[in-house]
Amino acid sequence: AGGAVAASLAGCTRRSVGPAVHTGRRRRWRLVSSFPRSLDTIFGAAEHFAKRLGELTAGRFEVRVHAPGEVVPALKVLDAVGQGTAELGHSASYYYMGKQPALAFDTTVPFGLGAREQLAWLEHGGGDELLAPLFAELGVVRLFGGNTGVQMGGWFRRRVERPEDLRGLKMRIPGMGGKVMSRLGVTVQVLPGGDIYPALERGAIDATEWVGPYDDEKLGFHQVARYYYYPGWWEPGPSLAFYVHRKGWEGLSAEERTALQLAAREAGLSMVAAYDARNPAALQRLLDKGVQLERFSDAILAAAERATEALHTEIAAKDRSYRRVLERWRAFRDASRRWFSTAELAYARWAYRAR
């Protein structure tokens, strides 16, 4: 599903962005990323953004991109941008659910929307309008920052065939997915990308999820865990976000704001396309190295889905903002599934059948 996002929004490509913005003022901003520099997909999106913004403004808007730890830790990006420590950030909003639970919907929730659906929900289904005030309270403006498409279920040292097999497992998994796994008996940890391999190698965790074959191969998880599970039911279409310091945004000209929006859109769509182009070959390489591909059982999926719905209900009962977003999100999800389960699903069942 993710690959079609780029096609459906191809109007924001290099050929269509228009003339460069010319203003009298030069700006030099910093962008802090939550993602390791070694990942040319996720971290690379921020570099793409910086490059295109410079081109669109004839070099008058310079952005320097920083990896985790160079300015702030990986999971402090939203705080840094909100406080003005950095003018820009690139991260996943569900990392910051502790500040506002409804931020999960900006990224993804378990058994939620695919990549195309997620973008549709945010931009045409009311998602951006609902979430913008929440980001404003945190001192930031949010721009589209990419999507990975449906993710893999992660790396496990041993097979998990039943819900009971999850109990006592130590796993790195953030966001709502982590909360659901916790309810299934998993001991959950939230680690930045660069810290996962050492934790898995020394046995501090028994399992981890990240994104998919291309990134996972780069991070070397196959060297310390044999079983590669799918699908990543907790991240069916996770969006990333570029954060802009709100006061900095308000100080920009209209032309500069447009340049930021265009650069962010192009970088985000390029990320979607890059994952869809690179994951197939990466998966085959992993299989050739002896990785054991495993599907989560229906029993595990059913237990996780029940836990997800219960969690939604509980959070909504305590948090008014979450309840408001959830109600609108569920209505969009249900309508979208009626459509996608018609033409899209019928085609996929035929075209993607085992050959």
Image (spheres, rainbow, N blue to C red):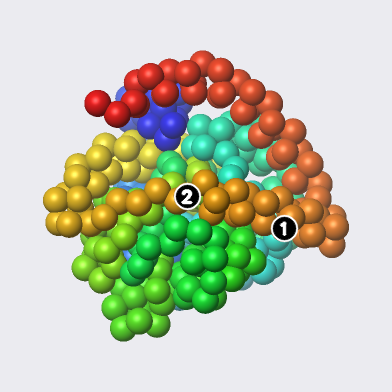
Residue 153, horizontal then vertical, whole percent: 42, 54
Number of on-image labels: 2
Q: CA distance from mark 1 to mark 2?
A: 21 Å
Q: Quadrant of residue 181?
A: bottom right
Q: Pointer 2: what residue?
A: 297
Identified by mark 2, the residue type is Ser
Of callouts 1 and 2, the N-terminal one: 2
Give left or right: position of 37 versus 102. Answer: left
Residue under the image location 36 percent in, 43 percent down: 271
Q: Residues within 10 Å of mark 1 (few under 14, many from 20)?
A: some
The amino acid type of the residue labelled 1 equals: Leu
Residue drawn 67% across the image and 56% down it:
307
Foreground of the two, 327 or 5: 327
**Quarter placement of the C terminus:** top left
What residue is at 32 percent from the left and 37 percent from the top?
276
Q: Which mark is residue 282?
A: none
Query: Element type at marker 2?
Result: loop
Closest to the observer, 315 or 273: 315
From this view, report whether residue 113 is shown above or below residue 27.
Answer: above
Find residue 71 and report its image quarter. Answer: bottom left
Q: Is residue 124 left or right of residue 198?
A: right
Circle 1 sits on which residue? 311
Give coordinates of residue 148: x percent, y percent: 41, 45
Question: Looking at this view, is 349 or 135 the one in front?
Answer: 349
